[in-house]
Amino acid sequence: MPENIRVVGCGRQSVTRTEDENSLSVSAQKRDLQYWADTPGQNRIVVGWALDTNTSGTTNPFTRPQLGPWITERMDEWDVLAFPRIDRISRKVRYFSELLDWVEDNNKHIVTVDGSLNTQAAGGSAVAKVLSVLAEEEHRKIQKNVTNGIKTLRELGRFTGGPQPFGYRSIDSGDEHRILTPDPVYAELLREIAGRVRNGDSTYAIADDFNRRGIMTWSDHLRSLKGKPVKGIVWKAATVARVIQNPVCVGYQTHNGEVWETEEGEPSVIADTPILKLGEWESATKALTARTRLKKVRRRDTACLLTGIAICGGCGTAMNCHHTTKTLKNGETRTYKDYRCSAKNRSVRCEALATIKESELEGIFTDALMDSIGHAPEMVKMVDEGEDHTPELEQKRQRLNRLESDYAEGKYDTPAKESSYWRTLENLTKKIAELESRPIRPRTVTFQQTGRRWADKWTAMGTQDRREFLSERNVRVIVWRDPMPGVKRGVVVHFGNLKEFAVAGGVDGAELSDWGEMGWNVPEHWMDPVALRDEAERDTVTEVFGSTELPVILIKVRDKTREIFPDAVSGYVSTLHTAA
């Protein structure tokens, strides 16, 4: 052993703590190690430190960020690894034994400053291995206690810790635990989000509005409450979606992505006053899910009006907007702008690649929109979910079915478990009977005028907002190449669920036929089934077009609107507009 014993002071901490906390803090461990090294007459000198923070006791010492390099790369620079106590080395017997074998093979030593371990002493390695078994067993007990404690808190409806969910503040529940209570400002903001989602606003539009209003995100709000500097994080559509999809909106506690249920079959509620009612939350999440099934619109400011809206009638593929600048022979530069089927770029087979000038297609669409709905008053859809306990009742029935199925499969095979089964069965049965006896108030839908026309709304929006508005309502512009003999291009403007708003605004049946869909240079029978009312007319259509069948893409677009917006007015007919 050299005259000076070279020591590496080693510490470990599972969770970062502040400098003034107890002896498990890294700073306290370092002080103990330094005090031990400075003991008079021992000739110890600290040549380095390996103080690992945020490092579990089950981590292999060879891979710890601070300690690992001293073992694998700098082994010639030290003689002894000193730890405050044995559990700071490792809580896994396998890793502990591996490190002991390594120090023996390489003529190194391990010491704990509390005196429990010294491999330099006779039998030190054997004692160390016994102590490592005890350390691992202690770790198992700690894990079990933590798990049981958290489970108990969930059963009691207590907040188990972690980031405070959107709209709630963590407060003392009065029994030395925590519970959530609505934040006065952000609880109202959550209600606004839920209402706007139910009424048709997109998450993008909500996020954009919050950014314009200067509303801080929830994480920045929490930082400001703690007196910490805010980061200036902006709202995003995905942020709004995550907020409204979280079951904590109705006060429910979750575990592994599922709502935690108590033994009584009830969701564990961790909020003293849930911000949203169950019906309000479920209708908002359903509205959000329905809209996210629509194809996403590319959100680039440079994108054209109908990006993500226009599709090729030949194959159903999106049409991209192309701007090509060419230099003519006379030196003049000219920009050509058009929409083109993107099937080739997507490796999709298309027998009739559609293309049309940008100004022409956008002009056709804008004229159709303004002629059909521009003069009508803008309407906002208001949904009153009423009082319907069916979702909660169905939830309890499913829970009862799972319970009885588990019992039949023998999962309640001990006296304690069987007692829990009968108690849960009784509570669930009572709850189901209670829910079945409650009155039901039907859901109602009303529309309110905003005081302006649809044309005013359209004029006030930018290109990006317009695309979002159209996509959220499944508005589609379908372009065909050679739709009729002697006609190069044809267009159908499909207005999606805007039909529902128009009817609410007072558009009568006669006008409705003018704007349910607008056709331009397409066969009459595509838009009006009455055009095939007798055999002679069907024969004529078959002779001219080869078939009376409608284009597959047109049928798919119509079916999609009916599927996503079941409340919308059904049926699609239109007068025919054919270019001269």
Image (tube, helix red, strand yellow):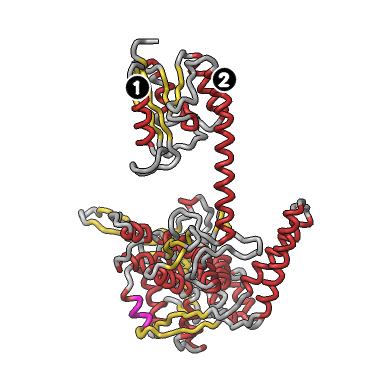
Nearest the viewer among 371 and 279 is 279
Three-letter residue code for mark 1: Thr
Task: Name the residue at 48% across, 73% down.
Answer: 198
Report the residue at 64% width, 80% height from top. Answer: 438
x and y, in percent, of residue 88 in the image: 46, 32
* Image: 42 above or below 33: above
Q: Residue at x 33, y 80 (%)?
A: 456
Task: Report the magenta residues as a range.
Answer: 453-458
Residue 485 in sight here:
no
Residue 92 spot, x, y in % from top left: 55, 31
Between 514 and 217, the one lying in front of the other is 217
Secondary structure found at label 1: loop
Mark 1 against mark 2, which lies toward the viewer? 1
Q: Position of residue 259 (x, y in %)?
A: 58, 60
Q: Is residue 355 magenta?
A: no
Residue at label 2? 126
Q: Please say if 278 is above or below 30.
A: below
**Counting residues from the N terminus, which is met first, the one under dot 1 or under dot 2?**
1
